[in-house]
Image: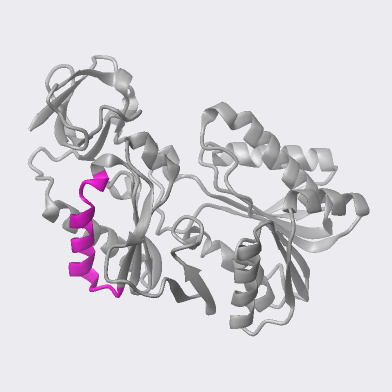
């Protein structure tokens, strides 16, 4: 087994269980280690820390897979890890549609697997895990006997690992537009052309949280994508729902989903939501409920202040569109904006809007995307409902 030795002074992050080891924490690394190989990792005084995959060319050269000295990293290791992840989801009741593997939270760094009934979408975002892609596919076949497996590795982060972007079938071809049921509603998931793996499973519980506040309400949904929140609002008895998104294909997909559920109290417009929120707040338009679900504003700490300003601005605009006593439903999927900071941003927006807030719900992603304390990237989604007075 190849060997990596860490420096005397390393982050307590590693001792506390974080699987990432940065270049400035490494003292020695075997010269003959090939990118993607498995290595044993030791402290400066030769204490065993764990086993992980290595990529000297990456900004994170080592990602730990296990702290068990006797574990063998082979096909059986990945089979057992995926089976363990599946047993966890089954225990919580996430069986039909779920995030089956959530990277570091399931001790499989940079591996994402989403399950849409009998179909699976895989992302292998680092070289070390990409090397085991065939074994991962074989494990899925043994455990689930799936109808199809698809690869969505068309993401720029792979290029930082020396990997090409790619997507396509990892099983015999199948129809990549997959019908699913969520909260008794029907949706089409386009795993080939949709964002990320085709659908945002992390909000599936949060979509139920709007059930009571939208009844008999005029609802505005900005950054609606394929209309999942808006369709839930219409289903839960809204008077009328208007969804906005800048993507024409997303809007067409949203309309298709609405038709699939026989909803007549909903419409969608293909517009720039940022501009519409600003213009309509100047015009004095008002809704009973305003829902905001924007994309991530930054992936790097260098742009954190811009992200803070962006979230403050859209929430300020959103609050101005809420009738007194109405509700704002707002989300952030930027993991660098942690929950306390997100709430501070909302409070700053309320101060500038001269509105007072009453918290209704403040929660994270659904539990099939488990949060591990100390792993910041697992605690990424903030979902907030406030009454705006």
Of 265 and 158, nearer the camera is: 158
For the N terminus, the image quarter is top left
Left or right: 310, with 125 as reference point? right
Q: Residue 342's image quarter?
A: top right
Q: Which residue lies furthest to the bottom in this view?
A: 262
Q: Where is residue 309 in the image (x, y as percent from the top left)?
A: 70, 35
**Range of residues picked out in magenta:** 129-147
Position in image of residue 117 (x %, y %): 37, 74
342 is higher (above) or lower (below) than 258 = above
Q: Residue at x 71, y 40 (%)?
A: 312
- In the image, is residue 140 part of the stretch drawn in magenta? yes
Give the residue at x 91% y 55%: 284
**With 49 as the anchor, is 168 left or right in this view?**
right
Q: Where is residue 238 in the image (x, y as percent from the top left)?
A: 73, 74
Reply yes or no: does residue 335 show up in magenta: no
Main secondary-structure element of the magenta-colored stretch: helix
12 relative to 131 in the view: left or right: right
Picture coordinates of residue 339 (x, y %)?
56, 42
């Amino acid at each position: 087994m190849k060997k990596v030795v860490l420096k005397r002074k390393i982050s307590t992050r590693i001792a506390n269980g974080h699987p990432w080891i940065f270049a400035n924490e490494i003292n020695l690394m075997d010269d003959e280690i090939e990118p993607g190989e498995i290595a044993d990792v030791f402290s400066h005084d030769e204490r065993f820390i764990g086993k992980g995959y290595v990529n000297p060319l990456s900004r994170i050269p080592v990602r730990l897979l296990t702290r068990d000295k006797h574990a063998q990293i082979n096909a059986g290791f990945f089979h057992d890890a995926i089976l363990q992840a599946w047993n966890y989801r089954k225990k919580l009741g996430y069986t039909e549609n779920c995030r089956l593997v959530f990277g570091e939270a399931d001790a499989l760094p940079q591996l994402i697997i989403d399950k849409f009934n009998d179909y699976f979408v895989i992302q292998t975002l680092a070289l070390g895990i990409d090397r085991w892609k065939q074994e991962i596919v074989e494990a899925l076949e043994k455990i689930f006997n799936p109808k199809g497996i698809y690869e969505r590795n068309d993401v720029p982060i792979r290029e930082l690992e020396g990997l090409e972007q790619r997507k396509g079938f990892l099983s015999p071809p199948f129809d990549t537009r997959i019908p699913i049921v969520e909260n008794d509603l029907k949706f089409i998931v386009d795993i080939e052309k949709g964002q990320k793996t085709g659908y945002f499973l992390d909000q599936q519980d949060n979509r139920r949280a709007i059930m009571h506040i939208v009844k008999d309400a005029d609802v505005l949904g900005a950054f609606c994508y394929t209309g999942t929140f808006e369709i839930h609002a219409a289903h839960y008895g809204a008077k009328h729902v208007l969804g906005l998104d800048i993507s024409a294909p997303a809007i067409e997909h949203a309309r298709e989903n609405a038709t699939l559920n026989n909803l007549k109290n909903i419409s969608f417009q293909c517009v720039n939501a940022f501009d519409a929120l600003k213009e309509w707040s100047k015009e004095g338009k008002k809704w009973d409920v305003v829902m905001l679900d924007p994309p991530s504003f930054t992936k790097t700490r260098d742009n954190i202040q811009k992200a803070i300003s962006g979230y403050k601005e859209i929430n300020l605009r959103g609050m101005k569109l809420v009738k007194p006593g109405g509700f704002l439903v707002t989300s952030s999927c930027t993991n660098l904006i942690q929950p306390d900071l997100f709430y501070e941003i909302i409070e700053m927006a309320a101060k500038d809007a001269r509105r007072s807030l009453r918290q209704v719900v403040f929660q994270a992603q659904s539990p099939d995307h488990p949060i591990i304390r100390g792993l910041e990237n697992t605690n990424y989604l903030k979902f907030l409902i406030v009454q705006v007075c």
